[in-house]
Amino acid sequence: MKWKPVSWEGDSLKVLDQTLLPGEEKYLTLKSVEEVWEAIISLRVRGAPLLGVVGAFGVYIGIRNSAAKSREEFLREVNKVIDYIGSSRPTAVNLFWAMQRIKEKVSKHTTLSVQELKRIILSEAIAILKEDDEICRGIGISGAEIIKDGDSILTHCNAGGLATSGYGTALAVLYRAREEGKSFRVYADETRPLLQGARLTCWELVKAGIETYLICDDMAGEVMREAKVNKVIVGADRIASNGDTANKIGSYSLAVLAHYHNIPFYIAAPLSTVDWELSNGEGIPIELRREDEVTHCRGVEIAPCGVKVYNPAFDVVPNKLITGIITEKGIVYPPYEKNLPLLRAK
Ligand code: MRU
């Protein structure tokens, strides 16, 4: 892959501005915590694992110029930065997971100076970035076993390299299957309102030379009825410990359609996307986004002024509609309440 969604270069966080794709490949350097927050809320960077990586570097960027005189003062500043970044997008648990990991790391070091703690935070963020690539490759290896020659896979939103440090989750399965020499095709939902499927998934799959058909979201049912797809694989923003999974709005409809048509429906995600504190999907916070994302499409007004809008960014797929959850440690099958924790301990 010639493109990189995120990199740490010298002392700067470089990200690919995903709002401009597929038209323009422009990299931004995020220099302040406010710029990190803006990049997240505007979806310049997006996708659960990538939000974790960017959030981790965001903490470092937010405290690197701290003039705190004591460890306690410094920890208060770290907490403030974490709360601020966390106020950007509520659903993807990876954002909170990564920042919590940094907080725990700092709390463990009780004798280090503020300068040393800053270095610890940066090295933890770099470790999270590096691990993400290894984890995504693990998801690819686990999931490739379900892909057979001649398969046709439907995916939704973008759970690709762009949503991670570079290799993806749902798309990692496809990248790995292709590396293993399997031949298959992909149907990509356009994913209104912000078109991550059309703009991002198609961008990276076409670049990778994978045969890809773009469909409007409302075509998925017909594509299934015509037996044009035989598997659905999507990503996840937060998985409850019973397997209920929040993912991009429209995932629930797809899962219901897949169930009706007897098509296996898989989630692909790192174990860091599991929120072990939630016993089911009811507690997953669903982000509500701006009305103009629905009334407008790429800046063009498509609905009359004055119409009311409901714009939830995610929905929850109940565990009973999920055939398997593909993780870096293998594929988990129902009952998830029992089998997900087993995998965690592995
Ligand atoms: O609003 P987005 O674009 O951040 O939503 C992204 C998704 O829903 C992805 O499917 C999910 O984060 C998994 S990414 C590997």
Image (tube, rainbow, N blue to C red):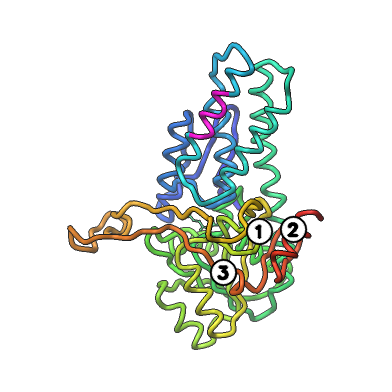
Give coordinates of residue 149: x percent, y percent. 68, 79
Q: Earlier in the sequence, mark 2 or mark 3?
A: 3
Q: Earlier in the sequence, mark 1 or mark 3?
A: 1
Residue 119 picture quarter: top right
Give coordinates of residue 189: x percent, y percent. 46, 69
Q: Are marks 1 and 3 in contact (CB under 8 Å)?
A: no
Say above or below: 236 vs 87: below
Q: Secondary structure at mark 2?
A: helix
Question: Residue 241 shows which numbered tag?
Answer: 1
Say above or below: 292 vs 37: below
Is label 1's Cβ within 8 Å of ligand 1?
A: no
What stretch of residues is rendered in magenta?
A: 76-83
Magenta region, main secondary structure: helix
Q: Amino acid at mark 2?
A: Pro
Q: Which residue is mark 2?
A: 341
Tell me the crowding category of disc 2: few under 14, some 14 to 19, or many 20 or more residues within 10 angstroms, Cα based.
some
Say above or below: 113 vs 153: above
Q: Amino acid at mark 1?
A: Ser
Q: Secondary structure at mark 3?
A: loop
Tell me the crowding category of disc 3: few under 14, some 14 to 19, or many 20 or more residues within 10 angstroms, Cα based.
some
Q: Amino acid at mark 3?
A: Pro
Q: Which residue is mark 3?
A: 318
Q: Secondary structure at mark 1?
A: loop
